[in-house]
Image (spheres, rainbow, N blue to C red):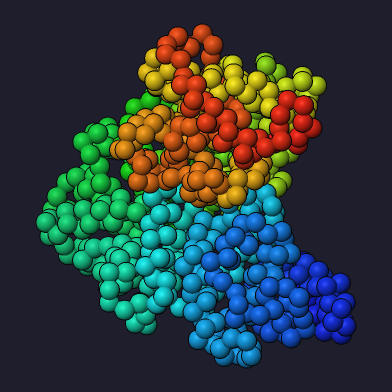
Amino acid sequence: MESRQLIDKLEYAIEQLEQARPFNKVRFRSAVLDVGGRLAGEPGGVDALYQLAARCDRAGIFADTPWDQPATLLPGLVRNTLEQGDRQTVLIELLSQLRLLAVSNGVYTHAGIPAEQARHFLAQVMALNLDHLLAGPGEAMRARLGRTSTAVSGVFRYLLENIGFADILGSLVHEVRRIMSQRPLQVDSVKSMITQIALARSRGEGGNGAAAADADRLVSNLFGPTATCADDPGVQLYLERVVRLSAGELESEASAFARAMHENGLVSDYHAVFLRWLALADVDLPIARESLQALALGLSSTGLDALRTFHDLVGRLIEGAVHIGTAQSVYGLALILESGMLYSAPVAPALWRQIDLRLSPVCAEIQSTVFGTQVTPATRLLAGTIQVLGQPLGIGQGNNPTCQAARAISMWASNDPDYLLHLISRAAHFDEIVLHFEGEPISSAGAAGAMIPLDTDPVSVLLVPHLDLIYRLMGELCAGRGDDPHRWINPELHGWWVGRECFLAVDIQTGGLRDYDAFLHRFYCSYHPFYNGNQPIIHPQPAGLAVTDSTGIFVGWHAITLIRVALDGDNVMRLYFFNPNNDSGQDWGAGVKVSTHGNGERHGEASLPFAELASRLYLFHDDTEALVPTTAPDAAELQEVKQMALSSWAAGRDATAQAPTVAGSSAQG
């Protein structure tokens, strides 16, 4: 529905609320909140809510609620409301924030709170909830609120644009670095935030302390990472300067770009321009072109060797994919070269095919609709392909229940890149992919254009509708088998390396625990190095989590990938895994807080101590014949893990309880 129509509906609902008697306000409040929630997801919707926030307050939207007396509100409680409240409670909270913004800006006067106090309150709320700005809704919020969860991010972005940065600059820079330590593919929100920081700093906001220095470094890494572009001169003037650089200055230029890129995983547009100039400009350079390219990409001897071996291919990839609108592909290209992926015989030919791939009209239209027309659809998809291959752990599912498809794309990019390239070419050119289930072909024909995830990367936008359809069809073929369909789906969907044995902690008919002691014992024997003969995880393995919120309450089932098990710097055995959620740094309650950096994580990995991850696990795969008899797991630790589960997601799931079932289709995500 158009924003104007929703605004008209909202004004009518507010009018009804205004006319209602005090004892009858609650009857008309729901209509205001319902329309307001839908409006918040529309372009310009949050601003429209802001304009009407004062009127809502006067009409009695907060009557007989804790928000009726704003002076008594505590900023530390806002997060709990957002994470635990139902849809209407969350919308009341957001509307209260917009009301306080109107007070702080002086456009609305409330007897209970002065403007300066309102501004201070909002600054504290922002500092405590910055993750909602950069990472979007988490698994728990998405499951609880659905599409309304996007309103939270929208309101917080609006608040930040209007209250300034002075009080939260340090926290904001820290949050940007925390998000980027995970190296996500989708960085538009982060770049937008850095742009806002740059504008604030240009206005003199933020002072001159350590936080200001960190903010300036973040801004310079994105908008002026080298001496030649430090003043952000614009592309044309920058190119005029570059052609006059000496050999030493060119080396310094290339190295500065690489340092800035690898520091946070963000790529400056000037970096893309410089790399294209090196690859395509018909000019004589005072130093070997290849050497400058290697410096600009930050390559080690391994990457340099790959660059020399596949020089023509790299040149075509730069020509076809690296543009101002797709600058992030530079980072993906650097990581592809460093990984040695191109030495796998099918990968280079598959990339040559991708370079010249003719997109179907449907595919081209989808890419343009989602990402705009700054570059061609083929360029966008090629750049996205390079990013996915270079950063397989950076894939996110967006605000969509598609963790299975996101996990599959990540696993193929990590473990079977030529197969992923095959699927991309089939979907992009023929609008169809065909996978097999127990020998029978399953087609995704008709999936293109259906249920497009709008907030993910170009490869996911292309493949997720196809994979979701095939995943559902596989689930239908498993109907009536009397067990979790992932037992059969995961090996058939993901690949031969998935363990053929599947261990499930939950009975799908009753939802109760099923042989849980044996489940935990087997998981320790399969994956814990102390009890499996020190066997590493050779291929990433799919697993299923029972996700809980910050109070430990069960939220839903979620697909992850087990990557490796190792001791961290404090000698704690940790399990490192891939979580396709946008931000893996989640609080699952009872002290179980997922780490994304600082505990030995590689970029894109999440981790937990082994016992804590085991306490949230409900499904894993392994091969019986691969089990090596060794020391038995510690009984006391297994009992501790069991109690952690029983006090969170497994509460009430004893052998006889009629707990929530694991659905026959078992759609995770």
Q: Quadrant of residue 205?
A: bottom left
Task: Tell me which residue sits at (34%, 31%) in the image.
Answer: 567
Pick the residue in front: 584 or 381.
584
Task: Tell me which residue sits at (42%, 71%) in the image.
Answer: 168
Q: Position of residue 142 (x, y in %)?
A: 65, 52
Q: Position of residue 35 (x, y in %)?
A: 77, 69
Q: Is residue 326 above or below residue 162?
A: above
Q: Describe residue 638's horizontal placement relative to residue 268 as left or right.
A: right
Q: Describe residue 209's horizontal placement relative to residue 480 as left or right.
A: left
Task: Tell me which residue sits at (83%, 73%) in the image.
Answer: 26
Q: Describe residue 580's horizontal placement relative to residue 665 as left or right.
A: left
Q: How many marks?
A: 0
Answer whether residue 653 is visible to the viewer in this image.
yes
Pick the residue in front: 547 or 165.
547
Pick the residue in front: 10 or 649.
649
Task: Tell me which residue sits at (76%, 70%) in the image.
Answer: 33
Q: Describe residue 179's horizontal placement relative to residue 645 as left or right.
A: left
Answer whether residue 475 is visible to the viewer in this image.
no
Q: Position of residue 439 (x, y in %)?
A: 67, 15
Q: Position of residue 55 (x, y in %)?
A: 73, 85
Q: Is residue 205 above or below residue 226?
A: below
Q: Which quadrant would the C terminus be assigned to in this image?
A: top right
Q: Which quadrant would the N terminus be assigned to in this image?
A: bottom right
